[in-house]
Image (cartoon, grey):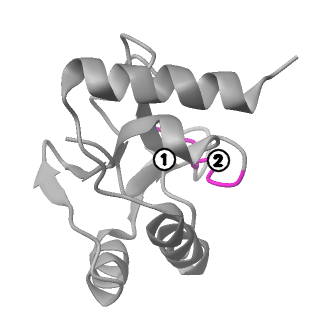
Amino acid sequence: MYDEDKHKRAVKAELTKRGLGSLMNDTKWRELLAEINKLPFPPPYQRKDLLQSEPAPASFDSDVWYHGDWDEGTHPLFSIEWIRIRPRYLKHLANLLPKATVSCEAELEQALQSIGQAYEKSDDSIWIYAYR
């Protein structure tokens, strides 16, 4: 059974151990998730949890065919160290045709700027740090 209080204590201990400070709070997360829901599609992302040594999914260096699960996959928000967003996906058109790249990069950047969300662009991705 999941014990949220125990998880929060472990996160706080890890933050103290690593000397990290918070860049996000519940309000910023809610604003971000609301803006993601307005995009043409929920972009795929890679999540690095404070208590995990590796991000999930482990491989995220090229475009993918799936969308991101922003409703269930981002919780608990307080334990996210960073999220790497690939604001595009590979759309299947037909068996004999190559997949088409569908992008929402411009819309995502505009959304992030509209809520004043700090982000970095690198490696064809948009990075949002919750702790540094």
State the quadrant of the C terminus: top left
Residue found at the very far right of the displayed protein:
1
Q: Residue 15 bears which disc, if any?
A: none
- Crowding around mark 1 (Cα neighbors within 10 Å: few <14, some 14 to 19, many 20+) is many
Position of residue 124 in the picture relative to residue 51 (left or right): left
In what element is the residue under mark 2?
Answer: loop
Q: CA distance from mark 1 to mark 2?
A: 7 Å
Q: From where the camera sits, is residue 50 visible?
A: no
The residue depicted at 20 percent of the width and 61 percent of the height is: 119
| Left or right: 129, with 44 as reference point | left
| Marker count (numbered) | 2
Prevailing secondary structure of the magenta residues:
loop
Residue 53 among magenta residues? no
Residue 34 rendering spot, x and y as whole percentages: 58, 76
Residue at (36% x, 73% y) in the render: 108
Q: Secondary structure at mark 1?
A: loop
Along the line of sight, the residue nearer the viewer: 26 or 119: 26
**What is the quadrant of residue 5 in the picture?**
top right
**In the drawing, does residue 19 fall left or right of residue 36?**
left
Q: Height in image: 8 above or below 100?
A: above
Q: Residue at x 14, y 56 (%)?
A: 120
For label 2, count other residues whose C-alpha is less than 10 Å away and answer few (under 14), some (14-19) or many (20+): few
Q: Which residues are magenta?
A: 64-71
Inspect the magenta stretch and tell me whether residue 69 lies in it: yes
Q: Are marks 1 and 2 in contact (CB under 8 Å)?
A: no
Residue 69's disc is 2
Q: Earlier in the sequence, mark 1 or mark 2?
A: 1
- Residue 61 on image: x %, y %: 27, 29
Query: Does residue 73 appear anywhere in the picture?
Result: yes
Residue 18 pos. (x, y %):
22, 21
* Amino acid at the residue labelled 1: Pro
